[in-house]
Amino acid sequence: MDLKLKRPLAFVDLETTGTNFAKDRIVEIAVLKLMPDGNVHEKQTRVNPMMPIPPQVIAIHGITDEDVKDAPTFEQIAKQYFIFLDECDLAGFNSTRFDFPILLEEFHRAGVIFDVSNRKFVDVQRIYHTLEPRNLAAAYKYYCEKELVGAHGAMADVKATYEVLKSQLDRYPQALKNDIDFLHEFSKDGDYVDLGKRMYYENNIEMFNFGKHKGKAVTDVFVAEPSYYDWLLKSEFPLDFKEKIKGIKQRMKK
């Protein structure tokens, strides 16, 4: 089943140096952009992370320091991908927990403001685990009846993710709608303020989701303990999270 789109949908997959949003970096990015008229555009880049890739991570995706030593840094390609992803809703496999938070951090570090506030997110893994509680290779075999060749290669993964989503729509016509707004709601796992899920919304109020103030309203904490705001900004949290709390603090001054 082909996807019904109101605007472009970009399937994104990243290979990285690790899973720490604040510290780790992208070593490969692949995007498959599906247009409402059915045209498909692909973009893929190896990236120099400017840090060593740990051996245990190389064992997963196979990208070595030697492979990326002459590749551009993310800062050098940030504007290209910002333009390529402009006006796109976003999709991926485990993307809301991993790919999108790291991508957003990389844009922040490059000084590029990548606004996600009006974008829809479709996480194919969330759909898969909700309806058929496993990984991308298993999903590809189950839904598409094919073996995933080149798993953990970014473009192979992103193409497989696109095929799996189309097959999910064919397989579950009663449960799924061919509509990005619906898939966004279906595949999200909570109503979070930031992509790292350190804050969530409760009745449209931002609440902390970690630490000693977990479950408390962010504004209440900033009023009762002003120094906590300064501590958050000085600590090693993702830039996306820091930008969100800055916005809340600014709003409190009005």
Image (cartoon, grey):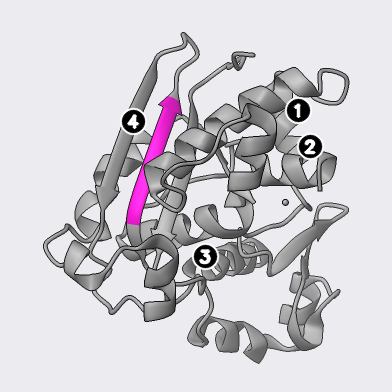
User: In the image, which is nearer the foreground, mark 3 or mark 4?
Assistant: 4
How far apart are the alpha carbons under marks 2 and 1?
A: 6 Å
Residue behind mark 2: 186
How far apart are the alpha carbons under marks 1 and 3?
A: 28 Å
Judged left or right of residue 92, residue 71 is left
Say whether marks 2 and 1 touch (CB < 8 Å): yes
- Element carrying mark 2: helix
Q: Residue at x 25, y 41 (%)?
A: 80
How far apart are the alpha carbons under marks 4 and 1?
A: 25 Å
The type of residue carrying mark 4 is Glu
Say whether marks 3 and 4 touch (CB < 8 Å): no
- Which of the pair 247/105 is nearer the observer? 105
Residue behind mark 4: 42
Above or below, comparing residue 12 to residue 245 in the picture:
above
Residue 38 image offset from top left, x and y in percent: 46, 11
Outermost residue on the top side: it is 37
Residue behind mark 1: 182
Judged left or right of residue 15, residue 2 is right
The type of residue carrying mark 1 is Phe
Q: Mark 3 or mark 2: which comes first in sequence?
A: 2
**Residue count near mark 1 (Cα–Cα under 10 Å), binned few <14, some 14–19, many ≥20:** few
Q: Mark 4 or mark 2: which comes first in sequence?
A: 4
Residue 234 image offset from top left, x and y in percent: 49, 87
User: In the image, which is nearer the foreground, mark 4 or mark 2?
Assistant: 4
Residue behind mark 3: 243
Q: Mark 1 or mark 3: which comes first in sequence?
A: 1
How far apart are the alpha carbons under marks 3 and 2?
A: 27 Å
